Image (spheres, rainbow, N blue to C red):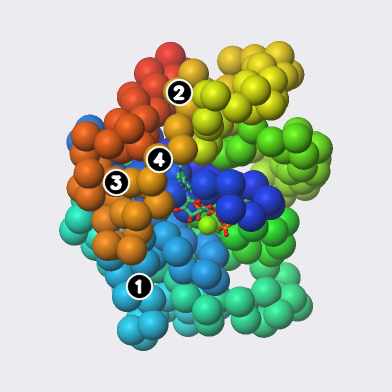
Amino acid sequence: MTRVLAVTNQKGGVGKTTTVVNVAASLASLGLRVLLVDLDPQGNATTGSGIEKQALTQSIYHVLLGQSEARAVRHRSSAGGYDILPANRELAGAEVELVNAEDREYRLRLALSDIAHEYDMILLDCPPALNLLTINGLVAAMRVLIPMQCEYYALEGLSDLVQTIRRVRGHLNTGLEIEGLLRTMLDPRNALAQQVSAQLEQHFGEKVYRTAIPRNVRLAEAPSHGLPALKYDPASKGAQAYLQLAHEMMDRFRASPS
Ligand code: ATP
Ligand code: MG
């Protein structure tokens, strides 16, 4: 069965893209067939996968507008061991161009239905906004993975996201559920982070992944080489944390196979 996971948080810079790229590479290293979909006009997941975004003649933009098939736009990240539907700045136009399209929220879901069977896992990297691109991600997904930094305002932002997920579940995608919350850039010496982390566990219980991703400079350096941390520095704390997360995700899948 193909699992489709939207990695989303409307707050910027919380580690969405880092998570998508490194989880994709980690799951691929465990033998899964993985597709990454870049839904962000910033194209960071595209660059981080070793693909030059300025040179793209076709991208996810053309797929969402119905001008190309997903199959034709797909690239291989040889360093990551996964496939990717890449994005660049052109994607910023999609929101406006789709505004009057009747099926505008369903574009990604429809596009993926052609190729989904070729994969075990499809990971969607959403932009830092609750906009039409993110809604397309939430409609195409079965589950949501929420990366978050354990900061003072983190929980507040989370309630907007949880509400959006509820709205999407009510109208557009009845099966949508939260798969898990991931603590990112965690500094164990930071007392406030520890406090927020504990609150998160209290509030969301089992939904919080036991694996937390530490702040690690290797994770920040790897994208400029177009590599996942697992290839850039496999022994680094960051690469190892994402590998551990991939194992934890697989254990959860085995525990709830649907
Ligand atoms: P945006 O909302 O802009 O799409 P994002 O949520 O995708 O951002 P990232 O781009 O993954 O967040 O991360 C933001 C910055 O923090 C990047 O420079 C990234 O390299 C760095 N970063 C992410 N995770 C870590 C980590 N665990 N340790 C150190 N740096 C990190
Ligand atoms: Mg990002």
Residue 2, percent from left and from top: 39, 40
Marks 1 and 4, how far apart in space?
A: 33 Å
* Circle 3 SS class: helix
Residue density around tag 3, few if under 14, some if 14–19, many if 20 or more, within 10 Å: many
Between marks 4 and 3 in the image, the one whose residue lies nearer the viewer: 4
Residue 114 visible (yes or no): no
Residue 76 in the figure: left or right of residue 43: left
Name the residue: 19% across, 58% down. Answer: 78
Find out if the beta carbon at label 2 lies less than 8 Å from the nearest ligand 1 atom. Answer: no
Amino acid carrying label 3: it is: Ala
Amino acid carrying label 1: it is: Val
Residue density around tag 4, few if under 14, some if 14–19, many if 20 or more, within 10 Å: some
Marks 1 and 2, how far apart in space?
A: 34 Å
Q: How many marks?
A: 4
Q: Which residue is mark 4?
A: 216
**Of pointers 3 and 1, the one earlier in the residue sequence:** 1
Q: Which residue is mark 2?
A: 211
Residue density around tag 1, few if under 14, some if 14–19, many if 20 or more, within 10 Å: some
**Of pointers 1 and 4, the one earlier in the residue sequence:** 1
Marks 4 and 3, how far apart in space?
A: 10 Å
Residue 195, percent from left and from top: 69, 20
* Circle 2 SS class: loop
Name the residue: 60% across, 60% down. Answer: 127
Amino acid carrying label 4: it is: Asn
Find out if the beta carbon at label 4 lies less than 8 Å from the nearest ligand 1 atom. Answer: yes
Residue 76, percent from left and from top: 24, 62
Above or below, comparing residue 72 to residue 76 in the picture? below
Name the residue: 34% across, 26% down. Answer: 244
Disc number at residue 229?
3
